[in-house]
Amino acid sequence: MKLYGMTDSGNCYKPRLVMAMLDIPYEHVETSSRDGTTRRPDYLAKNANGKVPLLELDDGRCIAESNAILLYLAEGTRLLPEERYERALVYQWLFFEQYSHEPHVAVRRSLLKYPERAKLATPERLSETLEGGNRALDVMERQLERSPFLAGAAMSVADISLYAYTHDASGGGFDLSAFPAVSRWLKQVEDDPGYVPMEPRRA
């Protein structure tokens, strides 16, 4: 399989982390929305939405959207429960990540990280994303005070999805020391034998 994505993108990190944890072989194809790669005709033929990540299967079929890729990769593995209710809880947290977490935590990180987006980092926008991000982190904190992982006793793709941008939330100006249960949970994800960091560690 081929995975098209940006190394420093949390959304692209999600499937890389799942494939590492499940020992799934793949080829990484660096593809960036910042340099125009995702707008080339050959890429748009694979994903008309022009975004990453994108998973290309061995038979040439493609799957876009990070959380959809996670569900595909995790089918029949330890990272996706079989029981109906437990599975629904995983879906619940995947939707939460996209609608309540990513628009604030990831967006604020992006505004502060990428120079070309600095003009969008108005005081109002930064204040809004900080408030929304802290609200999302508080929801996670309350859940993680009750259970080791977001969807229950075992790690799932819900944890991988929310780990991707939460572990780098400080890059968006969020103070994770205010969320001790979240901080504990981050360490638990990192203790998985298959864990790999988002970007290669510098020597």
Image (cartoon, helix red, strand yellow):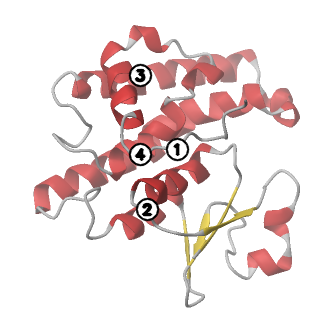
Residue at 29% over, 50% down: 156
Give coordinates of residue 175: x percent, y percent. Answer: 51, 11
Residue depth check, mark 2 versus mark 3: number of the one nearer the observer: 2
Mark 3 and mark 1: Cα distance apart in space: 28 Å
Q: How many marks?
A: 4
Give coordinates of residue 159: x percent, y percent. Answer: 35, 42
Mark 3 = which residue? 135
**Quadrant placement of the N terminus:** bottom right
**Quadrant placement of the C terminus:** top right
Instruction: Kindly state the secondary structure of the residue where label 2 is placed.
Output: loop
Mark 4 = which residue? 160
Mark 2 and mark 1: Cα distance apart in space: 11 Å
Mark 4 and mark 3: Cα distance apart in space: 20 Å
Pointer 4 or 3: first along the chain: 3
Based on the displayed image, in which of its 4 quarters is residue 107 positioned? top right
- Residue situated furthest front in the rendering: 203
Residue 200 left/right relative to 31:
left
Pointer 4 or 1: first along the chain: 4
Residue at 35% over, 23% down: 182
Mark 1 = which residue? 196
Mark 2 and mark 3: Cα distance apart in space: 34 Å
Mark 2 = which residue? 23
Residue 104 left/right relative to 35:
left
Based on the displayed image, in which of its 4 quarters is residue 163 positioned? top left
Q: Amino acid at mark 3?
A: Arg
Q: Nearer the viewer, residue 66 or 118?
A: 66
Instruction: Kindly state the secondary structure of the residue where label 3 is placed.
Output: helix
Q: Amino acid at mark 4?
A: Ile
Residue 170 left/right relative to 89:
right
Pointer 2 or 3: first along the chain: 2
Residue depth check, mark 4 versus mark 1: number of the one nearer the observer: 1
